[in-house]
Image: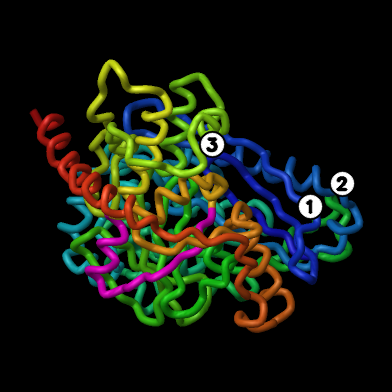
Amino acid sequence: MFLGIDVGTSGIKVLLVDENQQEVASHTEGLTVSRLHDGWSEQNPEDWWTATCRGIDVLKSRVPDAVAAIRGIGLSGQQHGAVLLDSAGEVLRPCILWNDTRAEAECVLFEERFPGSREITGNVAMPGFTAPKILWVARHEPEIFERLQHVLLPKAWLRYKMTGQMIEDMSDASGTLWLDVGKREWSVEALKATGLTRANVPELREGTVAAGYLNDELTKRWGMAASPVFAGSAGDNAAGAVGLGAIRNGDAFISLGTSGVVWVTTNVFRPEHQSAIHAFCHAVPETWHQMGVTLSAAASLAWWARTCGMKEVDLLAELPEKPAHPSPVLFAPYLSGERTPHNDGTIRGAFIGLSQDTSRAELTQAVLEGVAFSFRDALEGLKVSGSSIQEADVIGGGSRSPFWISILASVLGLRLHCLAHGEHGGAFGAARLARIAATGESVESVCTSPERVSATDPDSHLQNEYATAYRRYRRIYPALRNIQDA
């Protein structure tokens, strides 16, 4: 048995998988986000710990024999979050999350201090990344920075709680701006730019290798026959890729989760700065990836549902099976700023084109289309970098909506595949990494592609209409930027 733990933004998911890679049991514990100021996004790490323990307790109550037989544990983590610890390993403040945008000015400062950062780290400095957050703490909370001894990403902190060891994998480390992504090692220069050294960051491991063992207390608590080994594991998107078998050059997928991702696996480190495309290490050795990111994908629909006082599923039920035409309204999904291609943490969203006749269903469709257009922005950035995508799998909670998939296919001009278990995402990939670390099996033999249950092709008529709508959408960002600057 192998356990995958996904440290998400909205919840902790635990997934138990057997030797045939079949789900035995799963459970999700919800989480909340604290937003004390506009652009701020924080969570208490202890909430992750409590939710993880509850989740595994639930699995034990349901399938105690299966839990007792767990041989390996893998972690999938929300990236970029800054968990700050003192010399005793105690948390100094709430974790500043990936979608927090307060560190805009610190991005400029970081690149001034480390002029070669884009070539070494493979990425433009963005406020969501870890390094600018540390500069923000140093400038605004100096008493915290003085006590800072260790910086861990969310899943690395959870590993520390469960094993006592501070270890991070290459894919998650890529999102800090401290990793030399090409060499797959910490950059002394990048750390120095934030006032840190290698002593302040965890040991690095590949995602497929052993990286600690569950401590005796927890092994006893969950009735396990022996302490399971932890895999080096992965950041959430890399874990999702492992779950999809996206381990070969050119493999592509789209993640419709809280945030949105267009991913391409590469066999070389290929940075592309102009379009704010990310270039990260993969969770498997000697492999990298590129991805474009939109900060509010399914989060946009969740916001709209809250605003309407309805459930997301009920909003979607008001829509037909497939779109007949684009919505007359445009939606800019910049609720938490935007990464690809604008790298703008302070831009905010908008509805454009409201009238007396606008219906709720048209606004819901506009939200889905706005997210699809933001994916188109990412796809165009990948094309500039030299990556060509003809088809892609779709994962994440949004993949359950055929209407949304139809929009995406026509907006992107791609054949899109829905999967039998597309909602498992990072937890399943984490369980696969746990298996590789525990058994020594090859990546290729474990990371096979899941069953595709349906394919959606672009509608040629809608493609033309969406091409026109996308050109209008591209005018929204500069207009909003001008309005906000005024």
- In the image, is residue 215 part of the stretch drawn in magenta? no
Distance of label 3 from label 2 (alpha carbons): 28 Å
The vertical placement of 287 against 310, above or below, is below
**In the figure, is residue 219 to the left or right of 419?**
right
Mark 2 vs 1: CB contact within 8 A: yes
The vertical placement of 457 against 265, above or below, is above
Q: Quadrant of the N terminus?
A: bottom right
Question: Residue under circle 3?
Answer: 44
Viewer-proximal residue among 173 and 398: 398
Q: Position of residue 200 (x, y in %)?
A: 43, 59
Circle 3 SS class: loop
Q: How is the image coloured?
A: rainbow
| Dot label at residue 140 | none
Q: Position of residue 120 (x, y in %)?
A: 27, 71
| Dot label at residue 62 | 2
Question: Crowdedness of circle 2 by 10 Å Cα count: few (<14), some, many (20+)?
Answer: some
Distance of label 1 from label 3 (alpha carbons): 27 Å
Q: Position of residue 12 (x, y in %)?
A: 63, 45
Residue at left offset 55%, top offset 32%: 317
Identified by mark 2, the residue type is Arg
Viewer-proximal residue among 130 and 290: 290
Query: Of label 3 and label 2, which has the lower sequence position?
Result: 3
Q: Position of residue 199 (x, y in %)?
A: 44, 63
Question: Residue under circle 1?
Answer: 25
Query: Of label 2 and label 1, which has the lower sequence position?
Result: 1
Viewer-proximal residue among 251 and 203: 251
Residue at left offset 68%, top offset 58%: 4
Q: Which residues are magenta?
A: 377-395
Viewer-proximal residue among 29 and 327: 327
Identified by mark 3, the residue type is Asn
